[in-house]
Image (cartoon, grey):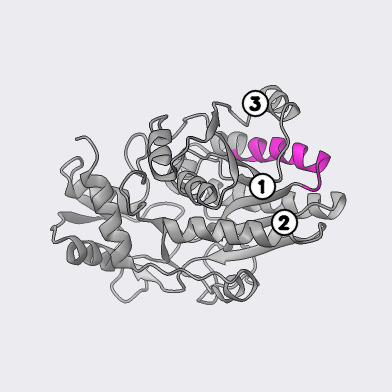
Amino acid sequence: MSRILVTGGLGYIGSHTTVELMAKGHEVIVVDNLSNTRESVLDGITAIAGKRPSWVNLDLADAAATQAFFAGNAFDAIIHFAAFKAVGESVEKPMMYYRNNVNALMHVLDYVTSNPSCACIFSSSCTVYGQADHLPISEAAPMKQAESPYGMTKQIGQSMLTDAAKAYGLKVTALRYFNPIGAHPSALIGELPLGPPQNLVPFITQSAAGLRGPLQVYGKDYPTADGTAVRDYIHVVDLALAHIAAMDHLIRQEGGDMHVFNLGTGKGSSVLSVIQAFEDATGTALSWAFAPRRAGDVVAAYADTERAASVLGWRAQRSLADSMKDAWRWQEGLPS
């Protein structure tokens, strides 16, 4: 079994991936500075995995602190989640996103370039495609001018990985997520951002629980079937399992090339259809209203997932209804 560093491992996707890595018997070291999560997530991971992972409270954008951490450690692989991730917030606070997301990756790559046997998986995003010309979106689609600073930091990150792989013979993979939703079926870990949610499903569940006002649906005049934006919503456990498959594949590869995979279901769902799916799956009615479009949002994005299926042997297995049920079970189990 391998020794794996999971950066941002107490975050939403990172915590679920940590659980799946531990289930496979890997030794997991988590780095997280709690910028958008809570230390109590460790308790949920421990309850599911039966063992507490090592955790280091570290800001990876701090060069000196990160260098000191790596000086005392060796890893077989790094899965790099640590980044700010809200499209709307990045439009309002672009320099915060560039400073954090780019610097953190640079400091991780400083370690990997000195230890080229260490595989590195980068948490990327479908935002790198902008508004794609063709749907579903394949990995061959060009990266367009990003619609947000968040998307731009992912494009910059992928360029850094590509250049470093060629120059230093590194083993690197970028996983381009579509829209992760849901929670672990145990309801012991899930999505719980600090402050108001920036993503659709946690706002749905918090609104349904009476913790927020009516849900706002941003935009009703998109050129889609019902006028609302379309996204590819993937269950977070499916996404976590994709990281295991990608890591196993990457460790076996020679270095020097960057591998890229889309991670989604291959199906697009509109905002209104997600609302309907939540109401149908949970029997809970939502109060919602239309609001103006948000800056940085594209019309539609859903994945061509054939490359991940053929190369990694991975496909998403859980339905939109499964995701809604698990997200609601997680919400209902939280203290009010």
Residue designated by label 3: 62
Residue for point 44% across, 44% down: 49
Disc 1 or 3, which lies upstream in sequence?
1
Disc 1 or 2, which lies upstream in sequence?
1
155 over 90 or under it: above or below: below
Disc 2 or 3, which lies upstream in sequence?
3
Crowding near the residue tagged with mark 2, few <14, some 14–19, many ≥20 C-alpha atoms within 10 Å? some
Alpha carbon separation for disc pair 1 and 3: 26 Å
Q: Is residue 28 one of those drawn in magenta?
A: no
Which amino acid does the dot numbered 2 rest on? Ile
Residue for point 33% across, 44% down: 188
Residue designated by label 1: 2
Horizontally, residue 290 falls left or right of residue 80, namely left
Mark 3, secondary structure of its residue: loop
Q: Which mark is residue 251?
A: 2
Q: Nearer the viewer, mark 1 or mark 3?
A: 1
